Amino acid sequence: MTERVTVTGPRRRRPPARRRAVTAEIDAQTQLGEVYMRALLRAQLRLSLAVAGVVLGLLATLPLLFAVAPRVSAIELAGVPLPWLVLGGLIYPALVAAAWFYVRAAERVERDFGDMVNRR
Protein backbone atom coordinates (compact mmCIF):
# COMPACT_ATOMS: atom_id res chain seq x y z
CA MET A 1 0.00 0.00 0.00
CA THR A 2 1.22 3.51 -0.80
CA GLU A 3 1.39 6.16 1.83
CA ARG A 4 -0.23 9.55 1.16
CA VAL A 5 1.83 12.66 1.80
CA THR A 6 0.45 16.20 1.86
CA VAL A 7 2.82 18.82 0.52
CA THR A 8 2.31 22.34 1.84
CA GLY A 9 4.20 25.50 1.16
CA PRO A 10 3.87 29.21 1.26
CA ARG A 11 1.07 30.75 -0.74
CA ARG A 12 2.12 31.67 -4.19
CA ARG A 13 -0.54 34.30 -4.68
CA ARG A 14 -0.46 37.46 -2.63
CA PRO A 15 -3.71 38.58 -1.10
CA PRO A 16 -5.10 41.67 -2.78
CA ALA A 17 -3.69 44.86 -1.31
CA ARG A 18 -6.22 46.84 0.65
CA ARG A 19 -6.57 50.36 -0.65
CA ARG A 20 -6.53 53.05 1.96
CA ALA A 21 -9.27 55.60 1.81
CA VAL A 22 -8.21 59.08 0.73
CA THR A 23 -9.49 60.47 4.01
CA ALA A 24 -7.14 58.09 5.83
CA GLU A 25 -4.29 59.36 3.65
CA ILE A 26 -5.15 62.94 4.55
CA ASP A 27 -5.53 62.15 8.25
CA ALA A 28 -2.24 60.26 8.32
CA GLN A 29 -0.56 63.19 6.54
CA THR A 30 1.07 60.96 3.94
CA GLN A 31 2.53 62.31 0.73
CA LEU A 32 -0.64 61.42 -1.16
CA GLY A 33 -2.74 63.19 1.46
CA GLU A 34 -0.52 66.25 1.14
CA VAL A 35 -1.05 66.23 -2.63
CA TYR A 36 -4.81 66.24 -2.13
CA MET A 37 -4.65 69.05 0.44
CA ARG A 38 -2.34 71.12 -1.78
CA ALA A 39 -4.82 70.73 -4.63
CA LEU A 40 -7.65 71.98 -2.40
CA LEU A 41 -5.61 74.91 -1.12
CA ARG A 42 -4.50 75.81 -4.65
CA ALA A 43 -8.11 75.85 -5.86
CA GLN A 44 -9.16 78.04 -2.93
CA LEU A 45 -6.24 80.40 -3.49
CA ARG A 46 -6.99 80.67 -7.21
CA LEU A 47 -10.61 81.53 -6.44
CA SER A 48 -9.75 84.12 -3.80
CA LEU A 49 -7.17 85.80 -6.03
CA ALA A 50 -9.63 85.95 -8.92
CA VAL A 51 -12.38 87.53 -6.82
CA ALA A 52 -9.95 89.94 -5.14
CA GLY A 53 -8.49 90.88 -8.53
CA VAL A 54 -11.91 91.71 -9.97
CA VAL A 55 -12.97 93.73 -6.92
CA LEU A 56 -9.68 95.62 -6.69
CA GLY A 57 -9.71 96.19 -10.43
CA LEU A 58 -13.16 97.75 -10.26
CA LEU A 59 -12.22 99.89 -7.27
CA ALA A 60 -8.99 101.04 -8.93
CA THR A 61 -10.68 102.06 -12.17
CA LEU A 62 -13.14 104.43 -10.50
CA PRO A 63 -10.61 107.07 -9.37
CA LEU A 64 -8.83 106.66 -12.69
CA LEU A 65 -12.11 107.23 -14.55
CA PHE A 66 -12.90 110.34 -12.54
CA ALA A 67 -9.37 111.71 -13.02
CA VAL A 68 -9.22 111.03 -16.77
CA ALA A 69 -12.77 112.20 -17.53
CA PRO A 70 -13.48 115.24 -15.35
CA ARG A 71 -16.82 115.71 -17.10
CA VAL A 72 -18.03 112.45 -15.59
CA SER A 73 -17.20 113.65 -12.10
CA ALA A 74 -19.03 116.92 -12.75
CA ILE A 75 -22.35 115.14 -13.40
CA GLU A 76 -24.90 115.57 -10.64
CA LEU A 77 -28.01 113.50 -10.02
CA ALA A 78 -30.56 115.00 -7.61
CA GLY A 79 -27.92 117.49 -6.50
CA VAL A 80 -25.41 114.80 -5.55
CA PRO A 81 -22.17 114.43 -7.54
CA LEU A 82 -21.88 111.18 -9.51
CA PRO A 83 -18.65 110.04 -7.77
CA TRP A 84 -20.43 110.23 -4.40
CA LEU A 85 -23.36 108.22 -5.72
CA VAL A 86 -21.10 105.60 -7.22
CA LEU A 87 -18.89 105.29 -4.15
CA GLY A 88 -21.72 105.50 -1.65
CA GLY A 89 -24.46 103.62 -3.43
CA LEU A 90 -23.00 101.21 -5.96
CA ILE A 91 -19.75 100.02 -4.42
CA TYR A 92 -21.27 98.38 -1.34
CA PRO A 93 -23.83 96.27 -3.23
CA ALA A 94 -21.02 95.24 -5.60
CA LEU A 95 -18.88 94.19 -2.63
CA VAL A 96 -21.78 92.21 -1.15
CA ALA A 97 -22.34 90.52 -4.52
CA ALA A 98 -18.63 89.65 -4.77
CA ALA A 99 -18.67 88.23 -1.24
CA TRP A 100 -21.81 86.20 -2.01
CA PHE A 101 -20.20 84.84 -5.19
CA TYR A 102 -16.99 83.97 -3.32
CA VAL A 103 -18.80 82.07 -0.56
CA ARG A 104 -20.87 80.10 -3.07
CA ALA A 105 -17.82 79.26 -5.19
CA ALA A 106 -15.72 78.30 -2.15
CA GLU A 107 -18.50 75.98 -0.97
CA ARG A 108 -18.63 74.44 -4.44
CA VAL A 109 -14.85 73.87 -4.40
CA GLU A 110 -15.07 72.20 -0.99
CA ARG A 111 -18.08 70.10 -2.06
CA ASP A 112 -16.26 68.95 -5.21
CA PHE A 113 -13.21 68.09 -3.10
CA GLY A 114 -15.38 66.09 -0.69
CA ASP A 115 -17.02 64.24 -3.57
CA MET A 116 -13.62 63.44 -5.06
CA VAL A 117 -12.26 62.20 -1.74
CA ASN A 118 -15.32 60.05 -1.02
CA ARG A 119 -15.43 58.64 -4.56
CA ARG A 120 -12.10 56.81 -4.26
Image: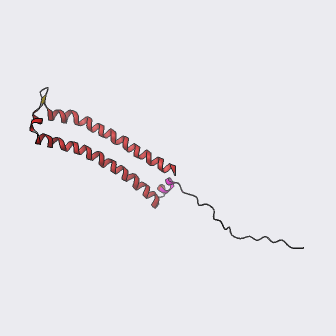
In percent of width and height, residue 117 lies at 48, 50
Quarter of the image where one finds residue 34: bottom left
> Which residue is at a point 51% across and 49% down the rendered structure image?
119
Quarter of the image where one finds residue 9: bottom right
The extreme right residue here reads 1
> Which residue is at a point 37% across and 40% down the rendered structure image?
104
User: Majority secondary structure of the magenta segment?
Assistant: loop
> In the image, is 90 to the left or to the right of 42?
left
> In the image, is 31 to the left or to the right of 15?
left
Can residue 101 be seen here? The reply is yes
Quarter of the image where one finds residue 10: bottom right
Does the magenta-highlighted stretch encompass residue 18?
Answer: yes
Q: Nearer the viewer, residue 112 or 41?
A: 112
> Which residue is at a point 26% across and 47% down the rendered structure image?
53
In percent of width and height, residue 101 lies at 33, 40
> Which residue is at a point 50% across and 49% down the rendered structure image?
118
User: How many marks do you count on the picture?
Assistant: 0
Relative to 14, is 118 above or below?
Answer: above
Quadrant of the snapshot with the N terminus: bottom right
In percent of width and height, residue 59 lies at 21, 42
> In the image, is 26 to the left or to the right of 94?
right
Does the magenta-highlighted stretch encompass residue 15?
Answer: yes
Can residue 29 be seen here? The reply is no
Relative to 52, is 84 above or below?
Answer: above
Residues shaded magenta: 13-25
Relative to 7, is 87 above or below?
Answer: above
